[in-house]
Image (cartoon, rainbow, N blue to C red):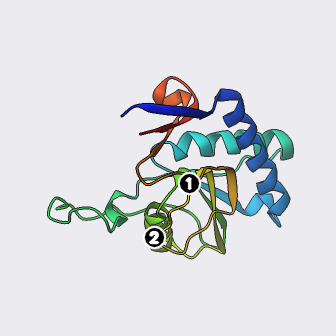
Amino acid sequence: MKMKTQIMDELAVRRAMTRISYEIIERSQSVGNVVLVGIKTRGVPLAETIRSHVEVNTGVRLPLYELDITHYRDDLNREIEVRKAPSVRLDITGKDVILVDDVLFTGRTTRAAIDAVFAAGRAKTIRLAVLVDRGHRELPIRADFVGKNVPSSLKEEIVVKVESVDGETSVAIYE
């Protein structure tokens, strides 16, 4: 895989995450009822960033959960999956859940995350925050909070890097 172009540097990612955080504050009836659910792997540090921005601006420290949706995927080879899906321990009943992920592409990861949330309880609402929306949906899913829309070809891959996982923060297109 060869890098075609960098579309966001660390500063652009920081700005996008700050804007998403403000949008969450503005569009939430009660910030105290919001729960962040970061989808592993890079959704978790992005959710942590949102949480710290919300806390600085409102004084409210949002609950944050880490979600591994592997067992809820419908596009994995089921012959490999032999373990039972782990029970999800999210305290989301009656809460306004915001799923946080790095890239929205086909919608399958989001659908799997929604299934995991449903397995955990009955949320009041479920919304989606993504750093990059690249289009090409296979399912009728849209993000409520988007850092950047990036039209891309199916031959390209959008790669998000975050400091805590990759040692740097950026978004680039690879082909």
What whole-number distance in Å separates the C-alpha atoms at marks 1 and 2? 12 Å
Where does the image place residue 22, in percent across and percent down from the top left?
81, 49
In the picture of the structure, the residue carrying the numbered disc 1 is 134
Q: Quadrant of residue 33?
A: bottom right
At 59% from the left and 66% from the top, the residue drawn is 92
Circle 2 SS class: loop
Q: Is residue 153 rendered to the left or right of residue 6?
A: left
Q: Residue 96 versus residue 3: which sits nearer the camera?
A: 3
Compared across the picture, whether 162 is left or right of 68 comes to right
Residue 76, by quadrant, is: bottom left
Q: Which residue is mark 2?
A: 138
**Amino acid at pointer 2:** Glu
Name the residue: 69% across, 44% down: 50
In the figure, is residue 164 to the left or right of 9?
Answer: left
Of residue 68 and residue 2, the one placed in the foreground of this image is 2
- Looking at the image, residue 103 sits to the left or right of residue 81; the answer is right
Where residue 100 appears, as percent x and y from the top left, is: 58, 53
**Position above or below: 50 against 2:** below
Q: Work out which residue is located at the far top of the displayed protein and give it.
A: 167
Task: Tell me the crowding category of disc 2: few under 14, some 14 to 19, or many 20 or more residues within 10 angstroms, Cα based.
Answer: few
Q: Estimate how packed mark 1 is, as few (under 14), some (14 to 19) or many (20 or more) residues with alpha carbons within 10 Å.
A: some
Position above or below: 32 against 117? above
Question: Where residue 58 sits: x, y (%)?
Answer: 85, 47
**x, y percentage for residue 24?**
77, 56
Q: Amino acid at mark 1?
A: Arg
**Which quarter shows the N terminus?**
top left
